[in-house]
Amino acid sequence: MPTGRRAATLVTMADERAQRAARNEAAFRAVNEALHRSPRDGDALQLVCECSDPACREPVVVSRATYEAARSDARRFLVAPGHEIGEVEDVVDRGEGYCVVRKHEAFAPIVEQTDPRRQASRHPRSP
Ligand SMILES: [Zn+2]
């Protein structure tokens, strides 16, 4: 049994699962961005949980300041408490009804490429 190869395969599978999770979270983030671009929302923002479960419909309510702070970093996501996954992200902030997680370095390319704000600012001065 080539154990070394088997171990490598398992790592790859875990990687793919984690990358898929990161893409799911990026998709939820895009939904929240579209929902809250308007300045007429009050201070409390009703979000969808940005965790890795594509079927998750857990509401997450945060202040606009918390939302903006999280959005300033492409690797941060807002999830419902308990929806964080330690193997792909760290909890960097926690409040009533929400958790802010930050993706591990390995997922930076995925979450940065899919960041709606980063895409919007890529050509800030184009006519
Ligand atoms: Zn969730």
Image (cartoon, rainbow, N blue to C red):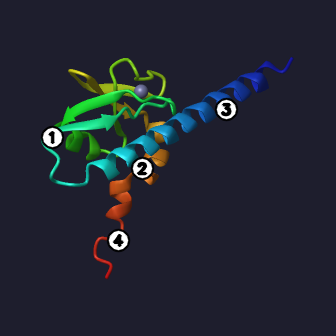
- Label 1 vs 4, first from the N-terminus: 1
How far separated are the C-alphas under marks 3 and 4? Answer: 35 Å
Of the residues under marks 4 and 2, which one precedes in the sequence? 2
Mark 3 and mark 1 lie on one chain; the one further toward the N terminus is: 3
Residue holding disc 1: 65
Q: Name the spot of residue 101 as percent of width and height, x first.
A: 34, 30
Q: Which residue is mark 2?
A: 112
The answer to whether mark 3 is within 8 Å of ligand 1 is no
Residue depicted at x 25% and y 54%: 37
The answer to whether 36 is drawn above or below residue 104 in the figure is below
- The residue closer to the viewer here, 123 or 57, is 57
Image position, residue 38 (x, y; %): 21, 55
Q: Earlier in the sequence, mark 2 or mark 1?
A: 1
Residue 5 lies, with reference to residue 38, above or below; the image says above
Crowdedness near tag 2: few (<14), some (14–19) or many (≥20) residues, C-alpha within 10 Å: some
Q: Tell me the quadrant of ligand 1.
A: top left
Label disc, if present, on residue 123 of the rendered structure: 4
Dot 1 alpha-carbon crowd within 10 angstroms: few under 14, some 14 to 19, many 20 or more: few
Q: Which residue is mark 3?
A: 12
Mark 1 secondary-structure assignment: helix
Assign the C terminus to one quadrant of the image: bottom left
Cα distance between the residues tagged 4 and 2: 16 Å
The quarter of the displayed image where residue 16 is located: top right
Tag 2 secondary structure: helix
